[in-house]
């Protein structure tokens, strides 16, 4: 799941990436172009039984991302704004910060 919070006075958008905890045995990482394609482990939230990561991204942009499950399996977010072929025979999710 992806949620976005637009700010009236800032040129950025707070984007929350969220994945149900049952998708993984031990960890979920976010891998994205705005993170230089380096896996960043998402925080496990016991209360909501999800993994979450919040990022502040510039307004009026599109950003590619995927989730890496247990350091071995790739997962796309079904709530991505769009998908784009990634050159490895699969697709990356796209999140848009256009309002």
Image (tube, rainbow, N blue to C red):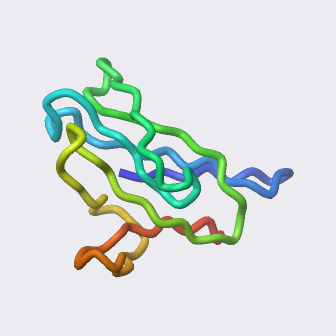
Q: Residue at left 35%, top 51%?
A: 1
Q: Is residue 72 above or below residue 32?
A: above
Kindly give the residue lying farthest to the right in the view shown: 9
Q: Residue at left 38%, top 65%?
A: 80
Camera-side residue: 87 or 30? 87
Q: Position of residue 81 (x, y in %)?
A: 43, 70
Quarter occupied by residue 48: top left
25 sits to left or right of 14: left
80 sits to left or right of 25: right
Kindly give the residue lying farthest to the top in the view shown: 46
Q: Residue at left 24%, top 41%?
A: 71
Q: Position of residue 98 (x, y in %)?
A: 64, 71
User: Exactly how many numbered labels are in the figure?
Assistant: 0
Q: Position of residue 5 (x, y in %)?
A: 61, 49
38 sits to left or right of 20: right
Camera-side residue: 48 or 37? 37
Q: Residue at left 73%, top 54%?
A: 12
Q: Quadrant of the C terminus?
A: bottom right
Q: Is residue 49 above or below residue 92?
A: above
Q: Position of residue 21 (x, y in %)?
A: 22, 33
């Amino acid at each position: 799941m992806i949620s976005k919070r637009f700010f009236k006075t800032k040129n950025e958008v707070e984007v929350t990436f969220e994945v149900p905890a049952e998708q993984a045995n031990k960890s979920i990482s976010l891998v994205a172009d705005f993170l230089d394609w380096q896996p960043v482990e998402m925080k496990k939230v016991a209360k909501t039984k999800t993994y979450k990561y919040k990022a502040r991204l510039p307004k009026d942009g599109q950003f590619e991302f995927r989730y890496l499950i247990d350091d071995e399996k790739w997962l796309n977010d079904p709530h991505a704004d769009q998908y784009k072929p990634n050159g490895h025979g699969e697709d990356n999710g796209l999140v848009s910060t256009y309002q």
